[in-house]
């Protein structure tokens, strides 16, 4: 392309020429690292980065191309891709269209770990419902760590600063290398079998991905999942996350964080105890004050302030009722006595005995018939004479009728 200062080419012409040159490259194999990864429906979008230079390019492929990669790749994986460069002259941007992806080196290692995570997650080993709560104040803390390591010092010193009386059972193992996972598994088994150990902390300082590989070992992960004692994972720094962090009952970002989350702070707990004691004292005092006010109110009532006064009032009422009852009963008895006397007088006035008392007598025959006149008696007949104070037995010697009585 011939250009001069007097005859420059428009920018669009240069951009179109660049696009033609890029198209002539065809399909090429490219080595890069996946910096970003996202999926939208049936297409996957990647940002490929050159680890040796500050250079990144957008790339994309179909979901079918991405899903057949074995093992699966994730962000940070180093890959070799077959790509066709495309230059968009209107935007002046370069992109790659991929049809093959192969994980290599460090990326391949990450891909294997990611595949292992998926398999273990499918078995439910990372399920939240499997996580156990740590004891509030463990009597003994089991610690698995490297001998004389900074991680051991961080856990022990920070835990004893928080709770001076905490006890440790420390088992030192290798924390990197081929036999590290087996040693950590054995230490975990010994601590899990110790009934005095209430919680187990597996701690290690930071390191590279290769250094932390033992803590992504499948055997170790399954041993932690099967442990009866709660396990705290404190591996590396906050950005490090081996598979052990996912299966442990609690993930601590650092060994220091593990100490803080395993034992309580004696100062904080003492403060909480004081606050709780103060709240209880206030509650008790308020309750006592309420009851005292209630008692004062009850004592101020007339029934309690002067209890005998009420009794005296009732006693006076009872005495008055008693006197009224006596008077009423006496009046009724007097009236009844008078009525009885009058009735008795009337009865006596009508009684034959009263007539007999006036000198009269009743004469009856032996068979009980009353002798009404002399005509019913005969000389020599025995008669009974009833007077007011007894009976007389007599015999008729003579009968003398009264003149005129017989005629009547």
Image (cartoon, rainbow, N blue to C red):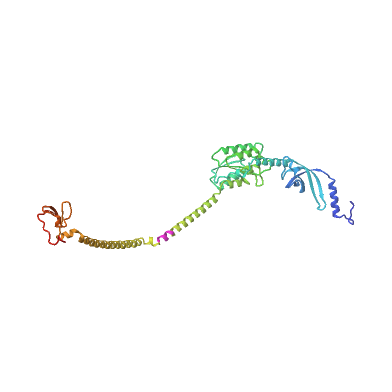
Q: Is residue 142 magenta?
A: no
Residue 373, image quadrant: bottom left
Q: Nearer the viewer, residue 65 or 3?
A: 65
| Residue 168 coordinates in the image, percent (x, y) | 56, 42
Q: Nearer the viewer, residue 166 or 20?
A: 20
Residue 233, image quadrant: top right
Residue at the image position 60 percent from the left and 36 percent from the top: 186
Residue at the image position 45 percent from the left and 58 percent from the top: 290
The magenta region covers: 294-299
Say left or right for 379 vs 239. left
Q: Nearer the viewer, residue 363 or 340?
A: 363
Magenta segment main secondary structure = helix
| Residue 281 coordinates in the image, percent (x, y) | 48, 55
* Total marks placed: 0
Residue at the image position 85 percent from the left and 48 percent from the top: 21
* Residue sitting farthest toward the front: 407
* Residue sitting farthest toward the left: 397
Asked if 190 appears above or below 406 in the picture, the reply is above
Residue 353 seen in render:
yes
Say left or right for 152 vs 407. right
The quadrant in which the C terminus is found is: bottom left
| Residue 329 coordinates in the image, percent (x, y) | 28, 61
Residue 197, image quadrant: top right
Residue 180 seen in render:
no
| Residue 365 coordinates in the image, percent (x, y) | 15, 53
């Amino acid at each position: 392309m011939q250009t001069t200062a007097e005859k420059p080419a428009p920018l669009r012409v240069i951009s179109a020429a660049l696009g033609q040159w890029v198209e002539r490259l065809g399909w090429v194999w490219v080595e890069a690292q996946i910096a970003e990864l996202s999926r939208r429906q049936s297409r996957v979008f990647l940002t490929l980065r050159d680890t040796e230079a500050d250079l990144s390019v957008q790339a994309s492929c179909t979901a079918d191309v991405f899903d057949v990669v074995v093992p699966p790749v994730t962000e940070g994986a180093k890959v070799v891709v077959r790509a066709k460069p495309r230059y968009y002259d209107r935007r002046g941007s370069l992109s790659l269209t991929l049809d093959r992806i192969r994980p290599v080196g460090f990326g391949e290692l990450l891909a294997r770990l990611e595949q292992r995570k998926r398999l273990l997650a499918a078995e439910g080993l990372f399920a939240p419902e499997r996580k156990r709560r740590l004891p509030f104040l463990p009597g003994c803390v089991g610690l698995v760590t490297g001998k004389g390591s900074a991680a051991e010092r961080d856990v022990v010193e920070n835990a004893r600063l928080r709770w001076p009386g905490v006890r440790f059972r420390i088992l030192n193992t290798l924390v990197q290398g081929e036999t590290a996972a087996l040693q950590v598994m054995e230490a975990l088994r010994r601590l899990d079998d110790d009934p005095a150990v209430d919680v187990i902390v597996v701690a290690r300082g930071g390191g590279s991905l290769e250094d932390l590989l033992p803590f992504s070992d499948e055997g170790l992960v399954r041993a932690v999942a099967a442990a009866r004692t709660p396990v705290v994972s404190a591996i590396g720094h906050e950005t490090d996350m081996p598979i052990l962090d996912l299966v442990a009952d609690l993930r601590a970002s650092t060994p220091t964080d593990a100490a803080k989350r395993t034992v309580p702070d004696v100062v904080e707990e003492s403060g909480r105890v004081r606050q709780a004691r103060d709240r209880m004292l206030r509650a008790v005092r308020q309750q006592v004050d309420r009851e005292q006010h209630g008692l004062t109110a009850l004592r101020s009532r007339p029934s309690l302030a002067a209890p005998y006064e009420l009794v005296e009032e009732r006693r006076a009422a009872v005495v008055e009722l008693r006197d009224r009852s006596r008077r009423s009963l006496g009046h009724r008895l007097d009236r009844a006595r008078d009525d009885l006397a009058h009735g008795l007088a009337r009865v006596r006035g009508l009684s034959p005995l009263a007539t007999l008392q006036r000198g009269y007598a009743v004469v009856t025959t032996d068979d009980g018939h009353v002798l009404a006149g002399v005509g019913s008696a005969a000389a020599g007949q025995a008669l009974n004479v009833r007077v007011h104070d007894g009976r007389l037995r007599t015999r008729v010697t003579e009968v003398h009728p009264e003149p005129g009585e017989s005629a009547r």
